[in-house]
Amino acid sequence: MDIILDFLTNISWWGWILIVLAGVAIRDIFFQKAHTISHNYPIVGHLRYWLESIGPEMRQYFVANNREELPFNRIERGWIYASAKKENNYEGFGTDRDIYAHQHIFVNNAMMPYKIADNHPNKIDKTFLPCAKVMGEFNKRKRPYRPASVINVSAMSFGSLSAKAVESLNKGVKIACAYHNTGEGGLSPYHSHGGDVVFHFGTGYFGVRADDGGFSMEKMVKLVNDNPFIKAIEVKLSQGAKPGKGGVLPAAKITKEIAKIRGVEVGKDVLSPPNHKAFSNVPEMVDFIEKIAEATGLPVGIKAAIGKLEQWEELADIMKKTGKGPDFITVDGGEGGTGAAPPSFADHVSLPWVYGFSDLYCLFKDKGLSERIVFIGSGKLGFPAKAAMAFAMGADCINVAREAMMSIGCIQSQVCHTNRCPSGVATQSKWLQNGIDPTLKSERLAQYFKTFRKEFIEITHAAGYEHPCQFKMSDIEINVDDHNLSKELSRTYMYNKTPVPFTSMQTLKDCSYLGGVY
């Protein structure tokens, strides 16, 4: 034994390295069968897998240019980070964007910008920008709601996001007077820090789930009565990143707390079915919406990605005939984000926002229904110029998800589905979450929203308007092709937006249905 110990202690450091490498080589050649490269090229083959694993980070930091990355490029992320931190978000020396590129947006400015009076609400608060429409007003709901912000937090579940991330978002929307959509994971304690909430549920009915896995009206009524900060209810039909497929929450993310809130088992993937149990066709869906609205008194809307229009036309016909139906419609684009989805769905199923929204809005406008619906846009619209385009097309509000995540620290590492989010935003790891300070991050979310609204108002004034609801299709041009580079939206998408009734910003501020804490 002493001889062996003496032999081992006399081996130099480089000798140990050679022994370890020899062991790896023997394993690669004779024992492991899973990886061809490491079998055929022992030791060296491992370098390939390591380089592949850090490839996205290397491209992000050293290879890709400022405008090249997807889903959000470095300039877009930088603007959000700087806006959230109240830092300098300007750029010098002129734009580095290719303004002749396909889909580039141009806002037609007025010769004379809109001039605000000394007693104007925006003279007092440069970030005051509520929705010009009231949810539930047409259908005479008992508790109508006017969102106090045109930009709000989109549907992201607790479970997909960490507890501290959800808490940061809710505290942030309270400061910014915006609303916080719960996502389909149910209402958690972290949604209950004072911000307005839109309760969202999908086919899993988490939070309002009956014993048989269906919808429980009794639980819905109790939820609304117990939580007066719930201002509206959203029924998810589909989402842009995976339309026609139920939500996925990997087992690695399911804690005992999440399981209790959702009513599911620990240690098993949570798969929401693609179809609702509560209704199976459009007339049944309209009846379902009306029953919830009657029982709760709240505005009720639907969220969907857009593809085929036949059933949407059926919905419009029923709404026109009966005077019933959703109070708001959230249109999600195919470019929308998700915590986990098959690439075949995320890449190919459903239309991008501009095509889906224009198809749907045009349909409802032709039926004379566009004035009674609050249209909400969702899908990479969290930048003032993109929002101007959305409002010119008919949107009344926008919801942002990944932009909101970035404002509280997300670095676009794109590992949301692995439970290893390095920023602690999209993980249930207690260690990784500890990097999030909700007090600080909530201020950053609020500052991003305020900066967004301030710049959006400034763009609106530059175009000669007081409120972005006044944008017309002719106010925005977009590059279409090489033969006719720039076309007005009305010529691009072949419709004109219905004018939104608007008196003044002061009227919106004085509205008794205004949300937030103004």
Image (cartoon, rainbow, N blue to C red):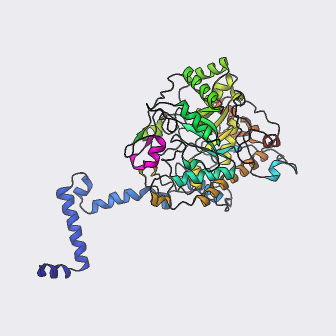
Q: Point out residue 391 in the picture as x, y percentages from the top left corner.
A: 69, 39
Between 449 and 288, the one nearer to me in the picture? 288
Between 430 and 389, the one nearer to me in the picture? 430
Res 486 seen here: no
Please identify the quarter of the rendering in which residue 2 is found: bottom left
**Extent of the magenta region:** 242-266
Q: Is residue 162 left or right of residue 290?
A: left
Q: Is residue 259 magenta?
A: yes
Residue ranking furthest to the right: 118
Please identify the quarter of the rendering in which residue 199 is found: top right
Q: Point out residue 516 in the picture as x, y percentages from the top left corner.
A: 70, 46
Q: Quadrant of the N terminus?
A: bottom left
Between 40 and 371, the one nearer to me in the picture? 371
Badge count: 0
Residue, x 65% and y 27% (percent of image)? 362
Compared to 397, does 167 lie above or below?
Answer: below
Between 329 and 256, the one nearer to me in the picture? 256
Residue, x 47% and y 30% (percent of image)? 214
Compared to 411, does 226 lie above or below?
Answer: above
Compared to 79, does 518 lie above or below?
Answer: above
Residue ranking furthest to the top: 321
Residue, x 68% and y 23% (percent of image)? 366
Q: Is residue 363 left or right of residue 340?
A: right
Q: Is residue 104 magenta?
A: no
Residue, x 22% and y 72% (percent of image)? 18
